[in-house]
């Protein structure tokens, strides 16, 4: 009969002494690695929170305290058309007019942002054949020319002529559109005239004609 082999206690003890330090070292390694990952996660989380806070704070400060350039740009995007010192219509001066300066309309405004109406087609209701032809520039040049001619002739009355020619835009006429663009772009003052002269009274002797629907009716 065979006897079961009996283990040597000293041999088992040596094996245990060999395995236990390895297990302990492995546990310490895993613990250190987990601690490092946790610390990295915490650090990255805090960094992201701080970065978001800085961005939000900078944005709020920019809104509350804009620079001069930003303030000017912000003002240019507003819908303010008429300045506080704008000239009101003066019936007395207009009644003495002997000549008419007529600017015929070609489109109506469809935007409340008119500070770029001299080049942005989106400010005007344009028909397909009018697009891409530089019409905003042409319209504003006509407005400027009318104001200059009226400024050079103090005995003239300036008329922006044009009715509601675009049914889709509703009750908006060409004459009023031109007047509003002159306000928004501050075109009224003649650059070569004395501020106190009659040449700088153009706005006070400007009217609109709001019924013409074609060039013949403009006249």
Image: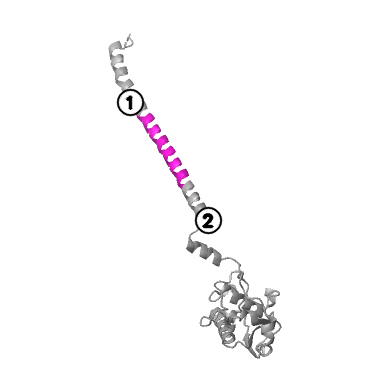
Instruction: Determine whether, in the image, residue 16 is placed left or right of residue 124.
Output: left
Residue 83 in the image: state x and y as whole percent. 60, 70
Instruction: Determine whether, in the image, residue 142 is placed left or right of residue 163.
Output: left
Q: Which residue is mark 1?
A: 25
Magenta highlight range? 29-51
Does the rendering let one see residue 8?
no
Q: What secondary structure is the magenta-colored segment mainly? A: helix
User: 62 and 106: which one is in front?
Assistant: 62
Between the residue at mark 2 and the residue at mark 1, the CA separation in whole angstroms equals: 57 Å
Position of 2 relative to 92 (above/below): above
Dividing the picture into quarters, in which one does residue 201 lie?
A: bottom right
Q: Report if residue 13 lies within the magenta region.
A: no
Q: Residue at x 35, y 29 (%)?
A: 29
Q: Secondary structure at mark 2?
A: helix
> Do the residues bearing badges 2 and 1 touch, measured as CB atoms within 8 Å?
no
Residue 78 in the image: state x and y as whole percent. 58, 65
Q: Report if residue 34 lies within the magenta region.
A: yes
Q: Which residue is mark 2?
A: 63
Q: Residue at x 37, y 33 (%)?
A: 33
**Mark 2 against mark 1, which lies toward the viewer?**
2
């Amino acid at each position: 009969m065979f006897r079961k082999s009996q283990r040597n206690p000293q041999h088992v003890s040596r094996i245990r002494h060999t395995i236990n330090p390895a297990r302990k070292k492995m546990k310490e390694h895993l613990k250190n690695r987990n601690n490092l990952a946790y610390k990295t996660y915490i650090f990255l989380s805090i960094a992201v929170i701080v970065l978001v806070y800085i961005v939000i704070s900078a944005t709020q400060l920019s809104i509350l305290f804009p620079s001069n350039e930003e303030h000017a740009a912000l003002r240019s995007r507003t819908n303010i058309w008429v300045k506080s010192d704008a000239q009101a219509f003066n019936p007395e001066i207009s009644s003495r007019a002997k000549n008419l300066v007529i600017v015929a309309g070609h489109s109506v405004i469809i935007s409340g942002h008119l500070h770029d109406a001299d080049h942005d087609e989106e400010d005007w209701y344009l028909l397909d054949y009018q697009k891409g032809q530089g019409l905003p520039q042409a319209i504003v040049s006509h407005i400027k020319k009318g104001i200059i001619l009226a400024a050079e002739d103090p005995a003239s009355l300036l008329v922006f002529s044009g009715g509601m020619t675009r049914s889709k835009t509703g009750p908006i006429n060409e004459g009023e559109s031109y007047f509003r663009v002159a306000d928004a772009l501050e075109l009224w003052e003649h650059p070569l005239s004395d501020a106190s002269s009659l040449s700088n009274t153009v706005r006070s002797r400007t009217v609109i004609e709001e019924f013409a629907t074609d060039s013949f009716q403009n006249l």
